[in-house]
C-alpha cells in the first residue's frame, strides 16, 4: 500500500509567476540529441554553493576527486520501463501511447503493479481518439537486443481506450499476454519530446537511457544525472572512502507535461519513492562527519520528502516541490544535468544553489556550448 508523504514545500497549485531567473534563452543546437560516445564522457561544471561561483569546468571522470572520505553518494536505482507504445487506428492513422502508471481495475489508486491491465496514459493525437476505441499495436523499429520484436504469442495485439480527455487517457492492455512481456516486445524507451527520433528509439537509446545501477522497474523518464556513472567510476569513488547508497523514486510524466495549458509551472505529479533502511542508516551516520550528495533531482526529492516525513518505511508518494525559499534538511551536494527553462527541476537547483548563482552558471554553460537536458552535460554543486 502506498502512503502519501509530500512534506512541506512550495504549493504548486497557485498561479504565482515563476521567479526571475527561472527562464533563459537556449539555442536549440545545444539540446543534446544523443549521448556522449562514452557513458562518462560528459563535461561537468562545478558550482561552489557557499560562494555562489563556478569553481571549475571539469568532466564527469573528475567526480571522484571532488568527493572525500566520509561522504555519502546516493543514487536512484529506479529502472525505466519501455513505456512508449505505437499503435494504429482502424483507418490506418498512427497513435502514440505513453503509459504513465498502472491503475486498479476500477480506475482507482489501488494499482496492482506493472502487470496491471488498466493504465493511466498520455496519448496523441488525442483529437482523433474516442472512448471505447480499439487500437492495434505496432512493433517498434528497434529492440533491446539485435533480434526482432517477435517473442511468440498473439501477432495482433489491441489496446482499448477506456476514457479520454485533454490528451489524458485510461487504456486497457490486452489480456492474452503479460504486461511485462508486452512492454518488452512492443514498447520503446520513453524518450522526452526534445529528443527527436523520427523512426523511434535507436538501439543505443535502449542502453544509454538507463543507469548502470537501474534495478526496480517503474520510471517513465530516466533519472538523468545517473546516466553518466559507470561501474569503474563508482568503484573509484568507493576506493576513496565514499559510501554509495541507493533509493527508488519512480519518475513520472512531468517532462512530457511541461508547458501544457492549465498546468501550474512548478507542478510535480505524484511520484512513488522508497528509502531503504540501510540508506536511512547511512544518511544518519553521515550527518556531522561528511556530506550527503544526491545524484539527481529525483534522489534529492526522495531524500527531502523522507526527511520531512520522519523517514517513513515502505513505498511512499510525494508531490514535493522544492523552489527558492525552501530549506534543504538532508542533501549537502548535488550532481545534476542542465534543465529546461521554467521547470520544477530548475527551480530545485535554484533553491539549492541560489537563483542568481544558477542564472550565472547557466549563462556560462550556454556561452561555453555545454550540452543540455537528458543526454547532456552535468553540474556538480558542492
Image (cartoon, rainbow, N blue to C red):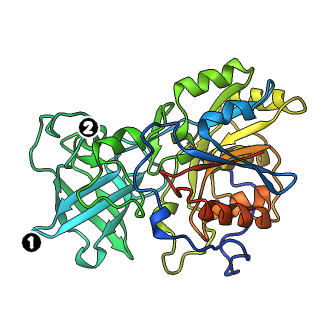
CA gap, disc 2 and disc 1: 27 Å
Q: Is residue 327 above or below residue 210?
A: below
Question: How many numbered marks does the figure carry?
Answer: 2
- Residue 251 visible at all: yes
Label annotation for residue 181: 2
Residue 275 point in image, percent of width and height: 66, 36
Q: Residue at x 35, y 66 (%)?
A: 169
- Residue 314 visible at all: no
Q: Residue 50 vs residue 346: left or right?
A: right
Mark 2 is surrounded, within 10 Å at the Cα level, by few (under 14), some (14 to 19) or many (20 or more) other residues, namely few
Residue 343 point in image, percent of width and height: 60, 67
For the N terminus, give its image quadrant.
top right
Label annotation for residue 91: 1
Q: Residue at x 60, y 64 (%)?
A: 366
Q: Nearer the viewer, residue 178 or 167?
A: 167
Residue 251 point in image, percent of width and height: 52, 50
Label annotation for residue 319: none
Q: Residue at x 72, y 67 (%)?
A: 359
Name which of mark 2 and mark 1 comes first in the sequence: 1
Q: Residue at x 58, y 60 (%)?
A: 339
Q: Which image quadrant is residue 364 in? A: bottom right
Amino acid at each position: 500500500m502506498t502512503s502519501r508523504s509530500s512534506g512541506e514545500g512550495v504549493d504548486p497549485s497557485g498561479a504565482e509567476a515563476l521567479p526571475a531567473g527561472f527562464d533563459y534563452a537556449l539555442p536549440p543546437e545545444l539540446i543534446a540529441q544523443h549521448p556522449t560516445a562514452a557513458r562518462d564522457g560528459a563535461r561537468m561544471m562545478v558550482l561552489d554553493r557557499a560562494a555562489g561561483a563556478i569553481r571549475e569546468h571539469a568532466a564527469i571522470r573528475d567526480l571522484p576527486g571532488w568527493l572525500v572520505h566520509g561522504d555519502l553518494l546516493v543514487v536512484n536505482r529506479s529502472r525505466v520501463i519501455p513505456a512508449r507504445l505505437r499503435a494504429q487506428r482502424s483507418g490506418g492513422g498512427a497513435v502514440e501511447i505513453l503509459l504513465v502508471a498502472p491503475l486498479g481495475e476500477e480506475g482507482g489508486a489501488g494499482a496492482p503493479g506493472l502487470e496491471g491491465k488498466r493504465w493511466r496514459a498520455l496519448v496523441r493525437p488525442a483529437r482523433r481518439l474516442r472512448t471505447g476505441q480499439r487500437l492495434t499495436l505496432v512493433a517498434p523499429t528497434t529492440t533491446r537486443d539485435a533480434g526482432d520484436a517477435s517473442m511468440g504469442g498473439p501477432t495482433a495485439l489491441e489496446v482499448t481506450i477506456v476514457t479520454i480527455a485533454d490528451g489524458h487517457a485510461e487504456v486497457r492492455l490486452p489480456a492474452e499476454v503479460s504486461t511485462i512481456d508486452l512492454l518488452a516486445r512492443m514498447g520503446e524507451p520513453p524518450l522526452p519530446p526534445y529528443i527527436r527520433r523520427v523512426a523511434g528509439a535507436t538501439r543505443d537509446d535502449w542502453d544509454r537511457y538507463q543507469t548502470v545501477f537501474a534495478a526496480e522497474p517503474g520510471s517513465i523518464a530516466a533519472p538523468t544525472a545517473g546516466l553518466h556513472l559507470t561501474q569503474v567510476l563508482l568503484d573509484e569513488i568507493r576506493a576513496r572512502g565514499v559510501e554509495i547508497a541507493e533509493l527508488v523514486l519512480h519518475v513520472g510524466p512531468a517532462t512530457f507535461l511541461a508547458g501544457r495549458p492549465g498546468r501550474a509551472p512548478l507542478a510535480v505529479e505524484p511520484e512513488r519513492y522508497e528509502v531503504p533502511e540501510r540508506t536511512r542508516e547511512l544518511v544518519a551516520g553521515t550527518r556531522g562527519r561528511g556530506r550527503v550528495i544526491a545524484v539527481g533531482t529525483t534522489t534529492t526529492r526522495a531524500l527531502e520528502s523522507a526527511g520531512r516525513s520522519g523517514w517513513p518505511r515502505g513505498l511512499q508518494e510525494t508531490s514535493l516541490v522544492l523552489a527558492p525559499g525552501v530549506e534543504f534538511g538532508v542533501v549537502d551536494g548535488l550532481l545534476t544535468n542542465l534543465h529546461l527553462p521554467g521547470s520544477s527541476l530548475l527551480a530545485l537547483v535554484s533553491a539549492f544553489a541560489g537563483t542568481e548563482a544558477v542564472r550565472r552558471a547557466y549563462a556560462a554553460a550556454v556561452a561555453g556550448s555545454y550540452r543540455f537536458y537528458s543526454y547532456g552535460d552535468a553540474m556538480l554543486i558542492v
